[in-house]
Image: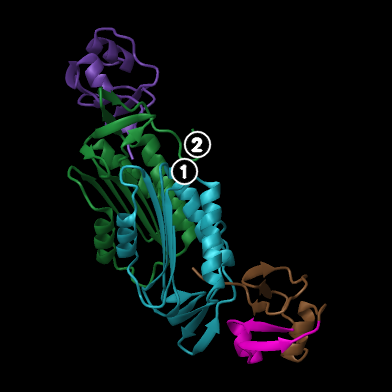
Chain colours: A cyan, B green, C purple, D brown
Amino acid sequence: MKIEIKTEAFDPLVEQQRYQASLDIQGKYGATAVFIGTMRDFNEGDIVKSMTLDYYPGMTEKHLQQICNTAAERWSLLDSLVIHRVGVINIGDPIVLVAVWSVHRGDAFDACRFIMEDLKAKAPFWKKEELEDGERWVEKNTSGYSKI
Amino acid sequence: MKIEIKTEAFDPLVEQQRYQASLDIQGKYGATAVFIGTMRDFNEGDIVKSMTLDYYPGMTEKHLQQICNTAAERWSLLDSLVIHRVGVINIGDPIVLVAVWSVHRGDAFDACRFIMEDLKAKAPFWKKEELEDGERWVEKNTSGYSKI
Amino acid sequence: MSIKVKFFANLRDQYGLTEEVVDFNEGISISEIWDKVTNRQKMPESIMIAINMEYSSGDVQLKDNDEIAFFPPVSGG
Amino acid sequence: MSIKVKFFANLRDQYGLTEEVVDFNEGISISEIWDKVTNRQKMPESIMIAINMEYSSGDVQLKDNDEIAFFPPVSGG
């Protein structure tokens, strides 16, 4: 299980590949569920030029670790990886990677989504969007289970 | 939208990367949900040495296409990619990749899981497992929504 | 009129059949096709049937050059 | 006794506060800490509070060297 905060751009597929290669689960996992969140060039009808992600060093890592621990208690998982960017983020940059390895797909899917939803709802990160005519803090995340 | 049957081993992350690079959705997608199914060395309590995946050329591709079309009607998707191995599969080999790109994570998660479940339930593939003392056809897939 | 009949997975092993071409007269049912090809062996309860590469309940009017496939529950992914 | 008080995101901009050290006597409440640091500005309804890096309802007994954080609803991922 690994949690990482990145201050520089990262390639989620390279990280996923590298972490998986470091695990001793070859032949044991049948299911990998992955989510990648990526910086869009628009939000709530406005063009977004870039974004700055603030966080709470110490608490953020601790909370992400708690989320992964909870997922590991609730589902049968072999491993999980969460990487989250902070700092200045450009269009198309990956923001978050959640990858979960399990024997069966049900556990992998459920746990991956749970981690992502919990991260969105409670992990201490805050986005400030740079717009064409100024900047704004994103007020809050909406639930991924119902569309707004 | 792309559907592919592979007769040779493939690297799902390379395929995902390559396909994504070919899409004109940079800055448009915020969510990528991915599932990778991988060959395990055990099943139903037995050691499995390798596996042979049979399919119905023509119908299999057609059915996978239908699944992706249905997903695209039901959710707001930017693109989707499904790759499935056939032939002789060794331990640790990727069997299936489902990747879905969307603006929002709810659509990406839901569609990725739907495609995977529908593929498991209806796409014409059949697994024959080579065990230590003979071989056997896998009888059927179980649902990913409830554990057996 | 003739129809192509395909078998997959364990049905191939079980009946020793892969692909057959069967002549038939209008109005023949799928179970009659099955009987003809397998020499009246019992059709498995869990069998899946596709006509021209689409799933079918089996209750259809067959046409010349149709392709019918018999296979067990799928196990891909 | 003293406590560290941290602010994040728009609260920093709004109150011009990032990190403060506040002296207090036993029994002081979180809202009293807030009043002291912000000079009695209204606490936002949607505020989130963490004590020693754990979410808190705010109804706790503060100890020497505790770290309290005030921040708006999160927006990561």
In which image quadrant can residue B128 be found?
Answer: top left
Q: Residue furthest top?
A: C40
The residue indicated by pointer 1 is A106
Q: Amino acid at mark 1?
A: Gly
In the rendered image, is residue A8 in sight? yes
Depth check, front residue: B70 or D64: D64
Question: On the rendered structure, is B55 left or right of A45?
Answer: left
**Image position, residue A96 (x, y; %):** 43, 67
Q: Residues within 10 Å of mark 1 (few under 14, many from 20)?
A: many
- Residue at figure coordinates x 32%, y 57% from the top left: A22
Depth check, front residue: A116 or C28: A116
Question: On the rendered structure, is B8 left or right of D15?
Answer: left
**Image position, residue A86 (x, y; %):** 45, 77
In which image quadrant can residue B40 be found?
Answer: top left
Q: Residues within 10 Å of mark 2 (few under 14, many from 20)?
A: few
Q: Which residues are magenta?
A: D1-25
**Image position, residue D1 (x, y; %):** 74, 84
